[in-house]
Amino acid sequence: MAEINYVTKEGLEKLHKELHDLKYVQRPFISKQIAEARDKGDLSENAEYHAAKEDQGLMETKIAMLEDLITKTRIIDESKLDTSKVMMLSKVKVINKQTKKEIVYTLVNEKEADLKSGKISFKSPIGIGLMGRKVGEVCDVQVPAGLIQLEIIDISL
């Protein structure tokens, strides 16, 4: 069974935008490169032609994978989310017990993760450690730097 890809509305729009760019900007550009390389003569010794054909194959593979991903994608209905425990799209305020630093994470799909904006994958070590937990719970999370303890202070959307 195919794994469903849960995303926000913005995440799905981003996937559609990327697919549109590949199909209607990149594909015509590569086709033009192939045509120009073909016009230069003998194809058997034409490196530009072979490189453009290889680029075309890679792009077509990427388009097919993206189309497949979009068919498996579902938008999460934020109105039905429960803020009593951490789940996808939860905005979680935690305090690192060792450093006493407060951090806010939003748990998202791995494709939407962006640490600079506080969005982490629910499949990341911290995301896994927080999933299903409630306010007041302390969880031990194994990260590359070692074991950290995070106390959940607040859960919102």
Image (cartoon, grey):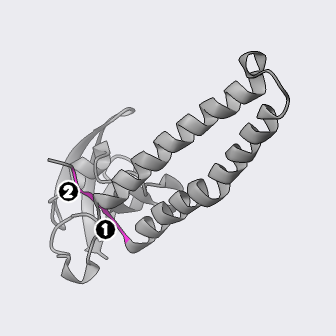
Q: Is residue 77 above or below residue 29?
A: below
In the image, 148 versus 19, the foreground residue is 19
In the image, 34 versus 11, the foreground residue is 34
> Marks 2 and 1, Cα distance to the nearest angstrom?
11 Å
Return the disc, 2 or 1, that comes first in the chain's sequence.
1
Q: Is residue 1 above or below residue 106?
A: above
> Could you tell whether 65 is left or right of 46 in the image?
left
Q: Is residue 7 above or below residue 4?
A: below
Query: Within 10 Å of the Cα at label 2, are there few (<14), some (14-19), or many (20+) other Cα atoms?
Result: some
Asked if one can make out residue 101 in the rendered structure from this viewpoint, the answer is no
Q: Amino acid at mark 2?
A: Met
Residue behind mark 2:
131
Q: Amino acid at mark 1?
A: Leu
Discs 2/1, front = 1
Residue behind mark 1:
89
Q: Position of residue 72 (x, y in %)?
A: 28, 58
For mark 1, give the secondary structure: loop
Q: Is residue 105 magenta?
A: no
Q: Is residue 4 magenta?
A: yes
Q: Which residues are magenta?
A: 3-8
